[in-house]
Amino acid sequence: MNQNDNASEGTNQSQTVLSAAQPTGQLTLGNYLGALRHWVPLQDQYANSLYCIVDLHALTVRQDPQELRQRVMELAAIYLACGIDPQRSTIFIQSHVPAHSELNWLLSTFTQMGELERMTQFKEKAQRHKTNINAGLFSYPVLMAADILLYDAHKVPVGEDQKQHLELARDIATRVNGVYGKIFQVPDPLIAKEAARVKDLQDPTKKMSKSAPSELAKIMLLDEPAKILKKFKKAVTDSEGVIRYDEQNQPGVANLLTIFRACTGQSEEEALAHFSHNMYGKLKVETGEAVIAALDPVRTRYQELMDEPGYLAGVLKEGAVQARARAEGVMGRFQEALGLTLDGTRFGDA
Ligand code: AMP
Ligand code: TRP
């Protein structure tokens, strides 16, 4: 598998990229460095790019309807503020393209319980949400496979935590193709080498997650500069007192170095040389400053966009129209193969 396929290698002018994020609370620095930041250059490297706001996935946890609506608009503004360009990419809301749900059902009949039981994210979430382990949480990766297979996506840029879900999408696609001939494009993950897993600032053995209970553990994309600096100053390190890259024994320092490098573009050697005679204090402050510089334009643009709700709605409406049209090809092919059509159509189709 091309898990380390670098997005900058070669142009792929006939291929499609697709990715998505859940509209559940603000995004973290991990989402930005591990995922969103990499989506921007792909717009120039691939013929088609689609970026989805997966509101149906968010429903695996009970949501307040008014808040969900707000979160969807915020995420759309974040996509644009990070540099996703509606002229070059299709930006849309998952539930506004009903084919996602339909394909989800069809694919679930090609997915084994055992495959879903093995998903580490399900196991983790089931631990956390003890009182609401709903069937949607269990079949979450099937809906994700539907998101991807619906558009014949070749490449799916995600953080490392999504690799297992991507493998399942590939297995489902291959299985269906094995029975019916080529129905689906088998997607490859695009996992950036840099910052694929940004860690929690308070417990650097865990990934930085929106759901971490401690505010100090995570940097939110829209945090004010002073807050960012404060969180970095309080980041957990160790008592070794030497700045080197050793993920095993010094996970906190390694995480700060990773973040510093991702935000400054420095190589490992450059960063280590830069901090060679320093203490952790300087590493923390300079990492905080590098993050502030990287996020500043995003925050400014986000605020401008949130003042233009009409514009955002227009982008999402156009995106939904484009996505619905694109989804028809795959759905038609699959329905036909399964025997769900009569004389090539369905009653009620236009
Ligand atoms: P989510 O917030 O779970 O909807 O994730 C959206 C995207 O961000 C996915 O591609 C994740 O792999 C990526 N992502 C989430 N957390 C991190 C992290 N701590 N480091 C790197 N990538 C991440
Ligand atoms: N499961 C992904 C996450 O939590 C979000 C997601 C849903 C996704 N559908 C997708 C990512 C399709 C890429 C492609 O990060």
Image (cartoon, helix red, strand yellow):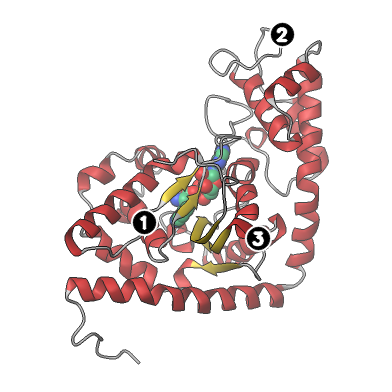
In the image, is 27 to the left or to the right of 96?
Answer: right
Q: Which residue is mark 2?
A: 241
In the image, is 124 to the left or to the right of 312?
Answer: left
Q: Which residue is mark 3?
A: 84
- Disc 3 is placed on an element classified as loop
In the image, is 288 to the left or to the right of 254?
Answer: right
Residue 270: percent from the left, percent from the top?
Answer: 75, 22
Q: In this view of the protein, which residue sits in the foreground, 235 or 339?
A: 339
- Label 3 or label 2, whichever comes before in sequence order: 3
**Ligand number 1: quarter of image:** top right
- Label 1 or label 3, whichever comes before in sequence order: 3
- Identify the residue at horizontal 58%, vertical 67% (top origin): 91
User: In this rendering, does residue 98 appear at all?
Assistant: no
Name the mark nearer the viewer: 3 or 2. 3
**Residue type, numbered disc 2:** Gly
User: In this rendering, does residue 147 appear at all?
Assistant: yes
